[in-house]
Amino acid sequence: MNSVVNPYDSFDPHAYLNMYYSEIGTEGDGLLRFLVDVFVDLNDGITVLEFGGGPTIIGMIAAARRASEIHYADYLPANRDVVQDWLSGNEDAFDWNPFIQRTLQYEDKSPLSDAAVSARAQQIRNAVTRVLACDIFQTPPVHTDQLYDVVTAHYCLDAVTESKEAWYENILKMKRLLKLGGTLVISSLQEARFSNLGGNKFLNVFLQENDVSAYLERAGFLPEHIRVKSAPADHAQR
């Protein structure tokens, strides 16, 4: 009898956070800057779905500036628990203050004080009204009765397949969760075939920068509305 092992069954969110978010690397910094640039152009009062957020809040820091409501979704219960700990104000939760501070710097908030960081943290907590389970292999990938102004999906649509066609289908699933005229924000590893954590290799579709715009156009997004930014990699084992 053949058995299939899902490496995410042994995924350790705390090891992941320590490896990738113990400091603000070039990838994280690039993502924070890009998200500030995206959300500064959007209206107040928007609804946001953070799909496949992992054990992080990084995708919601800039979003909270504009959002009246954020729904966070992830496949793994352990990831949802880690985020829920932070949302609940647990003192032992991961410290996201450096990432909040960097975001505020890019938003040109001055004076930049501890109070400003605490205020944004509370703004995020107030905005996140639902913590949901999701599964990109299901249709629909998340059970929700609404469409969103913005759907974000960071380092997840590409991290569950080695096939560009499957990655494209994942993009289409995200598009179906958008309101007409809504905004899709995705982040993917560039030219990576896997990511490495704790001795486990997690597969990743091999993408080049031009693949992103090409497949977004194929999915029906207008070329003049597509923005693609790259950041230098800070983890070589891929």
Image (cartoon, rainbow, N blue to C red):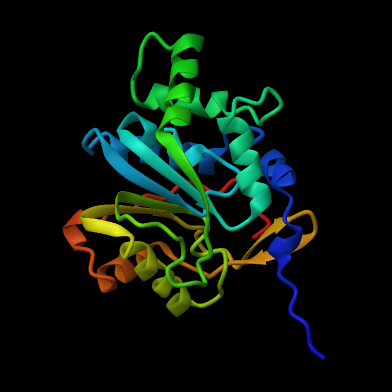
**Placement of 50 over or under 106, stated as above or below:** below
Residue at point 67%, 30% (across, down): 93
- For the C terminus, the quadrant is bottom right
Q: On the image, which quarter does residue 221 sit in?
A: bottom left
Where does residue 84 sit, x and y in percent of width and height? 60, 38
Q: Is residue 225 left or right of residue 238?
A: left
Where does residue 65 sit, x and y in percent of width and height? 34, 29
- Residue found at the very far bottom of the displayed protein: 1
Where does residue 92 sit, x and y in percent of width and height? 71, 26
- For the N terminus, the quadrant is bottom right
Q: How many marks?
A: 0
Q: On the image, which quarter does residue 35 sit in?
A: top left
Q: Nearer the viewer, residue 150 or 147?
A: 147
Q: Nearer the viewer, residue 80 or 99?
A: 80
Where does residue 173 sit, x and y in percent of width and height? 38, 68
Residue at point 61%, 46% (across, down): 80
Q: Is residue 213 left or right of residue 159?
A: left
Q: Is residue 154 left or right of residue 238?
A: left
Residue at point 51%, 65% (across, down): 158
**Placement of 11 over or under 165, stated as above or below:** above
Q: Is residue 62 visible?
A: no
Residue at point 34%, 25% (across, down): 107
Q: Nearer the viewer, residue 87 or 206?
A: 87
Q: On the image, which quarter does residue 196 sit in?
A: bottom right
Q: Is residue 120 visible?
A: yes
